Amino acid sequence: MKRWLVLAWLLCLGAVAHAQWGVSANLGFCMSNYSHTVSGQAAYDKTLPQGLTLDFAPRIGYAFSERWSAGVDLGFGYRNYNYTDGYYNPDKEEWEQSELLNQSLYSGAVGLFVRVRVLSWDRLSLHAELAAGYRQGFGTQTSTQYREDGWGDLQKIVTSRAMNEGQLKLQVVPVFHYRLGNQERERLSLDVYLNVASVAFVRTTTNVYGEKSLMSNGTELYSHTVTNDVDLAVRTLDASPVSVGFSYSF
């Protein structure tokens, strides 16, 4: 019995000695804009966004072997998008802006990942990564409406509401891993995530609350939206098409 215990202990010690801890950080950036014309005139499309998304995602990983690794993901993000609506004014023979909807959101995330190496070419290797995570965000939704008064002056009516957004995401994404040194045990490496080739399930819950006023403290629920998406590529407003990060093993 003691021999089996000693053998098991030696096997565990060998596995731990072979494995490596690693830390990394990925930075993602996405910017969206559009141009829209109707009959040759510049117009507006309220379904199209204009703005940007920033994501910073540190992680701690553990390599069980040369092929397999797993770990914990953290995430911090910022998102700011505008949606512009307008109408054609026959008197001026041009399109005029009627409403601007702005969504600004700060978020934090936590999740788990498992990665397996599929192919390798010297210092470059291709991995498949399965990740599951939850993101929670808090921000504001501001609507600005433009109206002309009886004197023809342009007036702005601004309505601001608090909002929060929870998102559950399961994703399989290909990752190119590049070792930055010539040595096999080089500690510093580069990861390139091909989000445009990912497969993901995303469930998003968005709550928008009432406007603060003398009659309301803004805590009552104004709208509640739940969406479920299965995507064969990146979701434009949630991540960048390609993200890059550095990892360090020790």
Image (cartoon, rainbow, N blue to C red):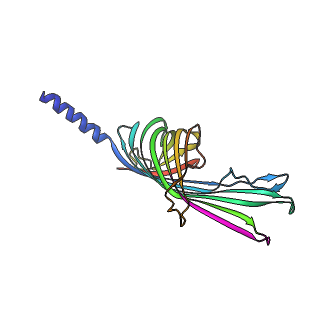
- Picture coordinates of residue 69 (x, y %)? 39, 40
Q: Quadrant of residue 231?
A: top right
Drawn side of residue 44 relative to residue 196, left or right: right
- Picture coordinates of residue 153 (x, y %)? 77, 71
Q: Main secondary structure of the magenta part?
A: strand
Q: Which residue is found at the position 52% from the left and 46% from the top?
A: 205
- Picture coordinates of residue 124 (x, y %)? 50, 42
Q: Which residue is found at the position 78% from the left and 70% from the top?
A: 150
Q: Please tell me which residue lies in front, 148 or 54.
A: 148
Q: Quadrant of residue 156?
A: bottom right
Quadrant of the snapshot with the N terminus:
top left
State whether residue 125 appears in this view.
Answer: no
Residue 19 forms part of the magenta stretch:
no
Q: Which residue is found at the position 76% from the left and 53% from the top?
A: 36
Magenta range: 150-164
State whether residue 216 appears in this view.
Answer: yes
